[in-house]
Image: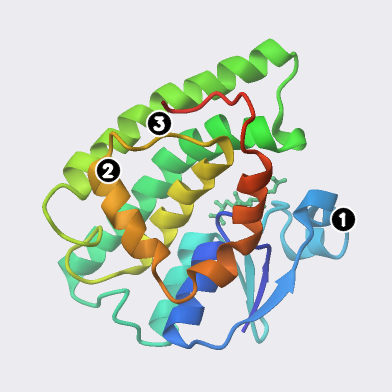
Amino acid sequence: MKLHCSKLSTTSRPIMMFCKDEGIGLEWVDVDIMQGEHHQPPFVSLNPNRQVPVLEDGGFKLTESSAILKYIADKHNSAAYPKELKERARVNEMMDWFNTGLYREFAYHLTYSQVFDHHKRQPEEANKVTAEWGRDQSAHWLGVLDKNFLGGGNPYLCGSQKTIADYMGAAYIAVGDLVHNDLSAYANIGKWMTTMRGAASWGEINDQIDGFAESTKGGSWIAIK
Ligand SMILES: N[C@@H](CCC(=O)N[C@@H](CS)C(=O)NCC(=O)O)C(=O)O
């Protein structure tokens, strides 16, 4: 299997980490999203959405990080995507929640609008309002994550076992480091992130994003305080 991806991509890293941790063979094909390679041929014919990641498994192509994680987990019979109906439904629920709720506000509105030039709205005031909107909406989603999903004393989102939802969710939270949010009010998220950051694959796969976060230190970011 081949993954067209970028270590700078929040939706690529969960797949890269999951495969690494589970010993699943996955060839990475780097797409330089900072140079706009995803807007050029041949990538655009692979994914007309102009986004990473894209999985290729023989002649089978698959976009959408959530679908890719589920496909790989099923293909390799991974316990990180439980088979039992209700357990699986819970993992699906979490992944949809992250993908459609927190990701939009926390990554796209709050973070990407400030750190990626091609996501910046014009005029500058519009971008400021976008980031502030993302910050304020994120506070709501983070509260739900902290109290409702992680507040029951379980180490992981769906119970005592790490699932593919944890890989997805942790990458989404970590991208907020680019604007240096202070998440100390969310103790359960902090505990869970410490566990997730301790995964064998974390350092290797997050090296570029961590380097990027180093470079944005000291900036005057709109962020959660
Ligand atoms: N719903 C898609 C979203 C993918 C996505 O947001 N990809 C970002 C990187 S994290 C991207 O390719 N962005 C291109 C850009 O910013 O121009 C998925 O989950 O795979």
What kind of element bears circle 1? loop
Q: Which residue position holds label 1?
A: 40
CA distance separating discs 2 and 1: 37 Å
Which is nearer the eye, 214 or 18? 214
Rate crowding at label 3 as few (under 14), some (14 to 19) or many (20 or more) other CA atoms within 10 Å.
Answer: many
Q: Is residue 11 visible?
A: yes
Task: Inspect the image, locate mark 1, and give the three-letter code of the amino acid beneath it.
Answer: Gln
What kind of element bears circle 3? helix
Q: Position of residue 190 (x, y in %)?
A: 31, 48
Q: Position of residue 9 (x, y in %)?
A: 62, 55
Q: Which residue position holds label 3?
A: 138
Instruction: Determine the residue positioned at 62% across, 32% down.
Output: 218
Is the CB–ligand 1 distance for label 2 below 8 Å?
A: no
Instruction: Determine the residue positioned at 41% across, 62% down.
Output: 197
Rate crowding at label 2 as few (under 14), some (14 to 19) or many (20 or more) other CA atoms within 10 Å.
Answer: many
Task: Inspect the image, locate mark 3, and give the three-letter code of the amino acid beneath it.
Answer: Ser
What kind of element bears circle 2? helix
